[in-house]
Image (spheres, rainbow, N blue to C red):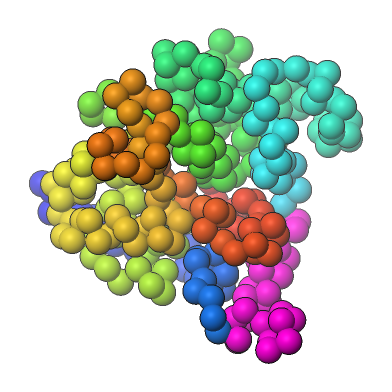
Amino acid sequence: MATQQASAFDEDEGDDELSAQMLALLMDVGPRESGSGAEDGGEDGSEDFNESELNAAFAQSLASTKGTFVEHGIDGSDFWLEGTSEDRERATHDEDDFEPEDWAIFYALRDHMRLLTSATTRPGARMKHLRWMMMPIADSQGLTFTDACHALQSRLMVVRTRAFYQLWRKRIALDLPKDGLTMCAPLPPMLAQEIGMHPAIGHIKGVKIMAKTAWEFPSVSLDTLLAKSIDRGVEQAAKIFDLLCEYGYLARFSVDIEGQGGDHDADLLPRVYFTGRNPTLLDGRRRNNFSWALSFVGDED
């Protein structure tokens, strides 16, 4: 059974028309080693207009017509502030950003994401907001995550991965059921295709299986992730994990016995999120110019 699952997932997924855009983007979102004049600038310290800049400009042009206010807003810290004050949000955004009826949807989505990622949210409440984001269920107002994102012209994978990244940055460990979330949204085909096309890791058997497993079990312990991946047919699981972290698809942190965030000490329990992107791996200028929305190619959810 594990072999069948692995084989099915390793098949190419998604729209091949995105291949060129993905490859261009992948050349500019991964980590870069310093020391090369061609990549780091000329001998006088200046930075030439190089291929990575061209790729970034190309990616930006692809996304410039999306009009996704939420997608671009999630780059800013104000989207993730503690609390749910509408007055504060009204002060930081223009009334023309949404139609009047869409403001209520925006506030609902933002409040779900804030409470999901707040360090002060109780575990039971946090799981409620996680299920709302990852499962086809409605909140008390009858709103689903999918409907909220579609109403605000935002791609589900962009908001979900950004929420996972926020949880990782805050070192929040989730108390998931042993078998994961029932009817959990699968790893988006576009992300599976992107990983499979990555010039550095896409050729490695099992890389998409581990990514899929981490997506399905947010904040999974490293030992459990490796064990589940091996059960699904992944070989060299530890090597694949390191590579997925190196290129920003996975990110790890450590927690102590009480579940509070800790450093990467050997006696602490490593936890893992699928983040899809990790701008902390980028150098200074690329990190400052990084946009979560523009780093995802295509209109798929």
Q: Residue at x 60, y 86 (%)?
A: 37
Q: How far across and how far down the image is residue 41, in percent?
A: 67, 82
Q: For residue 73: magenta?
A: no
Residue at the limit of the structure toward the top, as seen here: 140
Q: Nearer the viewer, residue 156 or 16?
A: 156
Q: Is residue 110 left or right of residue 99?
A: left
Instruction: Inspect this view and state whether residue 176 appears.
Output: no
- Number of numbered labels in the structure image: 0
Q: Which residues are magenta?
A: 37-65
Q: Is residue 85 left or right of residue 257?
A: right
Q: How far across and how far down the image is residue 157, in percent?
A: 52, 44
Q: Is residue 5 left or right of residue 31?
A: left
Q: Residue at x 43, y 54 (%)?
A: 249
Instruction: Inspect this view and state whether residue 76 appears.
Output: yes
Q: How far across and how far down the image is residue 221, in percent?
A: 28, 37
Specify the quadrant of the image occupied by residue 213.
top left
Q: Nearer the viewer, residue 292 or 8?
A: 292
Residue at the limit of the structure toward the bottom, as seen here: 43
Q: Is residue 259 above or below residue 205?
A: above
Q: Residue at x 72, y 52 (%)?
A: 66
Q: Is residue 111 above or below residue 185?
A: above
Q: Residue at x 67, y 18 (%)?
A: 83
Q: For residue 61: magenta?
A: yes
Q: Is residue 2 above or below residue 70?
A: below
Q: Is residue 296 above or below residue 140?
A: below
